[in-house]
Image (spheres, rainbow, N blue to C red):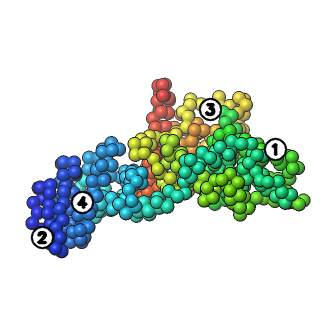
Amino acid sequence: MVNYLIDIKTDYWSIDSSGKKFNFSFEFIPDGYFRDTIKEITYKTLTIGNKAVSTQHRYNYFLKHFFNFLEETKVEIKTFEDFDYELAELFVFYLLDSGKAASTRAVCVAAIKNILDYGVFFKTPGFPRHTVFDGTEFRLLQTQDTLKTMVIDDDELEKIDNVLKLPFKNQGFPTRSNDRIGYLLPPLVAIIRHTGIRISEALVLKKDCLQPDILGKNLLEVISPKNLTERYIPVNNKVKAAVQYLLNEQEKRGLSELAESLFSYLSGRDVAQLGQSDARSKLDIWLSMHQLDPAITFHSFRHTLGTELLNNEMSPFEVMQYLGHESMHSTRLYAKVRNDKLTAEYKKLGFIGLIKESIEDLKDSSGENLNQQTKLVIQLPDGACGKPLEKEVPNCKKPNACLFCRKFITTPEYLAVHEDHLKRIRADKEKYMAEDLFGNEHILNQTEKALETIISRLKALEGGEIVG
């Protein structure tokens, strides 16, 4: 124990340690609870002596970034007990977007973590019961510097887009009798550029991968060899044009009846599949032909699109679903968004599908009423799924994700199922939180909010009230 002559009531402390003078200031901390609590914890930590005075002084200085974060993002907390996992993520995103060096960002987190850990360890009133940082935040803060080199520069991306505006046949390679795969590269680039799918996913796209939804819009079926999952993502007309070009080329080359995937080609008399090595080799040639940055890879397009989606106000949860990430950790790496946008996203509910009185009037993409068998095929435990109707999805393995999907339709007849779903989520919440402090807990909270809103709207609809 070390006894320092400090008047804890003052906002300025001067401490001599190891021949140096350290000046502490608490004036920047909002007066009242936070200032008094932080001063008390700082004093007790100093007297316990488990951290050097120089370390405590550095933490004191960098705490100002946390309170700047609260002010700039207009987040209000009354005590440290309001500091939850979601706020921890927001603070990390704020630091990532600040432009500060990785070492500075790390100390900013360590400073507030020091206060929280003390309160949690000593079970101080007004503090969370469990730590809200699990260590992954420091790995994320360091990774961000590396990620900057993975995103394609705006000017370079504009050059690429200008090349992709040309007809695919004019983007290819010099005519060579032994080049059987050059024509596949431009549409491959276009598809990955506008969808962000992995190269491994693009190369296994089926010929019928593009399907209309019930409104006639284009959905791309993406099968991931990485995690053996499938997802449907909305795509623009540029992707549709690339798929159609490949189908036309297959017909010209006599491949229509032989090939199963989009990126098949004739190798002698056999049908071969374009591989990743050949695709990357052709990409290097294509970049060189059009005087583009040779450092660009297929994965650069994925990182770039992930960043674009976040900057264009798509929520991290939606980006995670779109890109097929297995957890929020990968999605967080793309977080280069303004603080106010990010805060707004976390306060928003997100997609909760459509609330309707019944699904009897559900129609297919051609405007025809669905027969009973089709309705049963697309039906989920909590409602109905409006994915491409020819795809059977009776046993969806990600029902929580469906709650946030535009194509999910639910009606009052499923009210009891939704209420049971919410009950189960709340019962298992502590377990989920213990398993993954940073990722699953956020998704769990969003799902809980979605179910609460769905239930309230269905109750209003069942009671004859107008649901907005």
Give the residue pinned by disc 3.
Answer: 359
| N-terminal label among 2 and 1 | 2
Tell me the CA gap for discs 1 and 4.
Answer: 66 Å
| N-terminal label among 1 and 4 | 4
Tell me the CA gap for discs 3 and 2.
Answer: 73 Å
For badge 1, the amino acid type reads Asn
Task: Please give the name of the residue rendered at 19% of the width and 55% of the height, measured from the top-left corner.
Answer: 26
Q: Classify 10 Å Cα crowding around label 4: few (below 14), some (14-19), many (20 and above).
A: many
Residues tagged 1 and 3 counted as in contact (Cβ below 8 A): no
Give the residue pinned by disc 4.
Answer: 60
Specify the quadrant of the image occupied by residue 60.
Answer: bottom left
**Mark in the foreground, 2 or 1:** 1
Q: Classify 10 Å Cα crowding around label 2: few (below 14), some (14-19), many (20 and above).
A: few
Does residue 191 lie above or below 1 as drawn? Answer: above
For badge 3, the amino acid type reads Ile
Where residue 14 appears, x then y in whole percent? 14, 63
Give the residue pinned by disc 2.
Answer: 3
| N-terminal label among 3 and 4 | 4
Residues tagged 3 and 4 counted as in contact (Cβ below 8 A): no
Residue 248: numbered disc: 1
**Mark in the foreground, 3 or 2:** 2
Task: Please give the name of the residue rendered at 56% of the width and 47% of the height, measured from the top-left corner.
Answer: 155
Element assignment for label 3: loop
